[in-house]
Image (cartoon, helix red, strand yellow):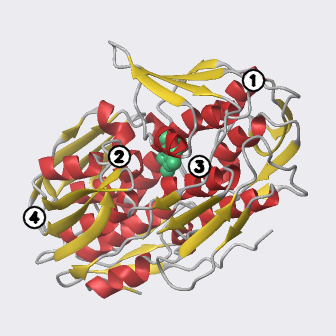
């Protein structure tokens, strides 16, 4: 078990105009899946632009423990990762427990992956991950024949699974908008005979479907007249290694984008950002609020659309963000709330039930963080209203509890860059889970963070 990084506070101060190029690291969702699918496929997978954050490195460890060979031969950013997979159906029983740290995606997708194998696996995580509900993944796995040998109350980690001799393919309607649950069922289906079907009433990020197809899986998606997606995967087919280029993570790009929008005089470029429509809800919302985001050179990069984004400071106005947009910006509500604090009028965000079960209860964490920094907001069970004040006069002066949540830490540091008084977050170490370069990158743009 690796020891947790020492936690230390960080403080952001009102900064001069941000300028320059913000090269944000690779997409976290695609990075996890690259290691998993590459580790499972026959032959070699080469990955460029992999996010080398703590969460993703835990997934690499788990795949290695099950027989995949995963190396990073070169040095420096953007280096290539080389993976030689076991072949579909040929994962080995690991010697010890998996420690997934803070990583919800890594742990839930891996539960799916191993859930259909006749072997025992144990999952552990940090205090945040141990509070998160795993029943949403264990329930469909139980239908496929997986036994949950041990689990903390409420189907939480630490937990131990044992898959069946032969898994039963199922048809499963995902009860909440969750790409992790969808993906876990599909990954379990990879080692089940016959067709596993996932029915997805509300579309979520589609990286699993797209990438599995790229690895040669027999998978098809049909959208019916009601807009419900039916994803059918034929199990026990061959997966073959391939080359992957990981675009910049729109969920990480969100921080410099909002920072440049609220810090007067700013003008930055964020290159190579993933523009998959299941991920761009924040950009759309900020544009509706009056943000100045220019989408330059939209292009295809290895099967995903990417673009360079030029972002300049702008005066914002409050909007109502409809609940159906939530899946395409689910990780971006904390930083959108910070943007909303600088907008004229009220921003109302609805349909936020899933925010309660992220790395922290993000609805509560955001509301408390805004309140201690003098920002007027109302927290409801599944909604948040923020009443903004352009210019940020009187904002700041508070210390924000991050609750082991990287996106809470980064969002409130962005607040501090434009608030009148400094903003402190109690733990900067958590940022390394998804965006280890954050502090250095923001300082290079001109942000004052100590
Ligand atoms: C992810 C899905 C989302 C998101 C998470 C990454 C994925 O979680 O919040 O950061 O890569 O599948 P849910 O599936 O719980 O919404």
Residue that numbered label 1 is attached to:
144
User: Which callout, 1 or 2, points at the residue further toward the start of the chain?
Assistant: 1
User: Which callout, 2 or 4, points at the residue further toward the start of the chain?
Assistant: 4
The residue at the point 63 percent across, 76 percent down is 72
The crowding category of the residue bearing disc 1, from other C-alpha atoms within 10 Å (few below 14, some 14 to 19, many at least 20), is many
- Answer with the quarter of the image where residue 291 lies: bottom left
Secondary structure category for the residue under label 3 = helix
Asked if the residue under mark 4 is in contact with the one under mark 2, i.e. CB atoms within 8 Å, the reply is no
Residue that numbered label 4 is attached to:
314
Label 2 to label 3: alpha-carbon separation: 16 Å
- Find residue 158 and report its horizontal and vertical position in percent: 80, 48
Secondary structure category for the residue under label 4 = loop
Q: Is residue 197 above or below residue 191?
A: above
Residue that numbered label 3 is attached to:
105
- Quadrant containing the N terminus in the rendered view: bottom right
User: Which callout, 1 or 3, points at the residue further toward the start of the chain?
Assistant: 3
Secondary structure category for the residue under label 1 = helix
Label 4 to label 1: alpha-carbon separation: 52 Å
Q: Which mark is residue 329?
A: 2
Comparing labels 3 and 4, the label whose residue is closer to the camera: 3
User: Which callout, 2 or 3, points at the residue further toward the start of the chain?
Assistant: 3
Please indicate whether residue 96 sits to the left or right of residue 269 in the image: right
The residue at the point 34 percent across, 19 percent down is 227
Label 3 to label 4: alpha-carbon separation: 34 Å
Q: Is residue 25 above or below residue 321?
A: below
- Answer with the quarter of the image where residue 143 lies: top right
């Amino acid at each position: 078990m690796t020891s947790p990084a020492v936690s230390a506070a960080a403080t952001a101060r009102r900064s001069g105009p941000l300028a320059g190029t913000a090269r944000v690291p690779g997409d976290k969702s695609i990075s996890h899946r690259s290691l998993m699918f590459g580790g499972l496929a026959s032959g070699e997978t080469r990955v460029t632009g992999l996010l080398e954050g703590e969460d993703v490195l835990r997934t690499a460890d788990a795949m290695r423990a099950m027989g995949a060979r995963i190396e990073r031969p070169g040095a420096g950013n953007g280096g290539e990762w080389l993976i030689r997979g076991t072949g579909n159906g040929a994962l080995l029983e690991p010697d010890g427990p998996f420690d997934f740290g803070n990583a919800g995606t890594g742990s839930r997708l891996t539960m799916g992956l191993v859930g259909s194998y006749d072997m025992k696996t144990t999952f552990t995580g940090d205090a945040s991950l141990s509070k998160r509900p795993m029943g949403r993944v264990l329930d469909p796995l139980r239908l496929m024949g997986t036994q949950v040998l041990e689990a903390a109350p409420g189907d939480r980690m630490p937990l131990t699974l044992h898959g069946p001799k032969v898994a039963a393919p199922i048809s499963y309607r995902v009860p909440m908008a969750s790409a992790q649950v969808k993906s876990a069922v599909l990954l379990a289906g990879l080692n089940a005979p016959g067709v596993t079907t996932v029915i997805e009433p509300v579309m979520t990020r589609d990286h699993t479907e797209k990438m599995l197809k790229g690895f040669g899986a027999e998978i098809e998606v049909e959208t019916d007249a009601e807009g419900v997606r039916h994803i059918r995967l034929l199990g026990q087919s061959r997966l073959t290694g391939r080359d992957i280029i990981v675009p910049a993570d729109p969920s990480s790009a969100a921080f410099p984008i909002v920072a440049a929008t609220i810090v007067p005089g700013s003008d930055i470029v964020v290159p190579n950002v993933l523009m998959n429509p299941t991920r761009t809800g924040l950009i759309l919302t900020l544009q509706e609020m009056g943000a100045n985001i220019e989408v330059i050179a939209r292009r295809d990069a290895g099967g995903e659309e990417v673009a360079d984004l030029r972002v300049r400071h702008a005066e914002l106005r409050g909007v109502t963000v409809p609940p159906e947009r939530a899946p395409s910006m689910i990780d971006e509500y904390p930083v959108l709330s910070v943007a909303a604090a600088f907008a004229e009028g009220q921003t109302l965000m609805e349909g936020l039930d899933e925010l309660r079960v992220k790395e922290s209860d993000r609805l509560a964490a955001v509301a408390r963080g805004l309140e201690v920094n003098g920002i007027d907001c109302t927290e409801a069970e599944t909604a948040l209203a923020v009443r903004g004040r352009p210019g940020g006069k009187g904002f700041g002066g508070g210390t924000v509890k991050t609750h082991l949540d990287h996106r809470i830490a980064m969002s409130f540091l962005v607040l501090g860059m434009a608030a009148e008084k400094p903003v402190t977050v109690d733990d900067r170490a958590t940022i390394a889970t998804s965006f280890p370069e954050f502090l250095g990158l923001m300082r290079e743009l001109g942000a004052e963070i100590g």
